[in-house]
């Protein structure tokens, strides 16, 4: 990916902060792994606390997370005055957050269909753990790339879609 403009330290910070949305959303999927590896729970405790804070409902289904999501989309991704680097990373973070929400919906659908079968808890554990590990890996890679001032453009499909959205 070509660089569109210079990347300042403030751009690196703002781009990294947008990745808090998907990592806080996926922390609930790590429950099975937290039981297996207690030190992992200690590492993710601040993220879990942040998730509790932004999941607070203001009005019925409207939470701080939903408001933050739309603010990032409207005021960062769709604002062409914001640096391209920050816009790209914000869009990629929002796409990762959408994947977490879709996986949550898929799990609920599978629970309604397959919940009574004996193999469902095992299948749920696999789906949740893979989702947690995948989003966590994408988070670590993306934040590390942001700190270096490089585009995190090696996430298959997600990076391509994010780049098309912020051209």
Image (cartoon, rainbow, N blue to C red):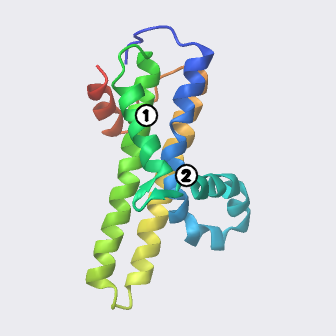
Residue 131: % across, % down: 44, 59
- Work out whether 31 lies above or below 157: below
Residue 24: % across, % down: 54, 52
The disc label shown at residue 72, or none: 1
Residue 34: % across, % down: 63, 68
Residue 7: % across, % down: 53, 13
Specify the quadrant of the image occupied by residue 91.
top left
Residue in the picture at 36% in, 51% down: 99
Q: Earlier in the sequence, mark 2 or mark 1?
A: 2
- Work out whether 116 lies above or below 43: below
The disc label shown at residue 54, or none: 2
- Figure quadrant of the N terminus: top left
Q: Could you tell whether 135 is left or right of 106 in the image?
A: right
Q: How many marks?
A: 2
Specify the quadrant of the image occupied by residue 123.
bottom left
| Dot 1: element | helix
Q: Callout 2: 10 Å neighbours few (<14), some, many (20+)?
A: some
For the question of whether residue 55 can be seen, the reply is: yes
| Dot 2: element | helix
């Amino acid at each position: 990916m070509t660089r569109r403009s210079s990347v300042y330290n403030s751009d690196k910070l703002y781009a990294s902060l947008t990745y808090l949305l998907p990592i806080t959303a996926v922390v609930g999927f790590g429950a099975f792994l937290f039981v297996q590896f207690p030190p992992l729970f200690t590492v993710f405790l601040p993220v879990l606390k942040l998730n509790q804070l932004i999941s607070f409902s203001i009005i019925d289904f409207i939470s701080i997370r939903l408001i933050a999501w739309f603010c990032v989309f409207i005021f960062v991704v769709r604002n062409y005055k914001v640096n391209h680097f920050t816009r790209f990373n914000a869009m990629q973070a929002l796409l990762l957050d959408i994947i977490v929400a879709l996986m949550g919906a898929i799990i609920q659908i599978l629970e309604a269909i397959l919940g009574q079968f004996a193999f469902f808890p095992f299948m749920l554990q696999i789906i949740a753990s893979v989702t947690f590990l995948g989003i966590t890996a994408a988070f670590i890679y993306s934040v590390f790339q942001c700190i270096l001032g490089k585009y995190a453009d090696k996430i298959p499909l997600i990076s391509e879609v994010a780049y098309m959205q912020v051209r």
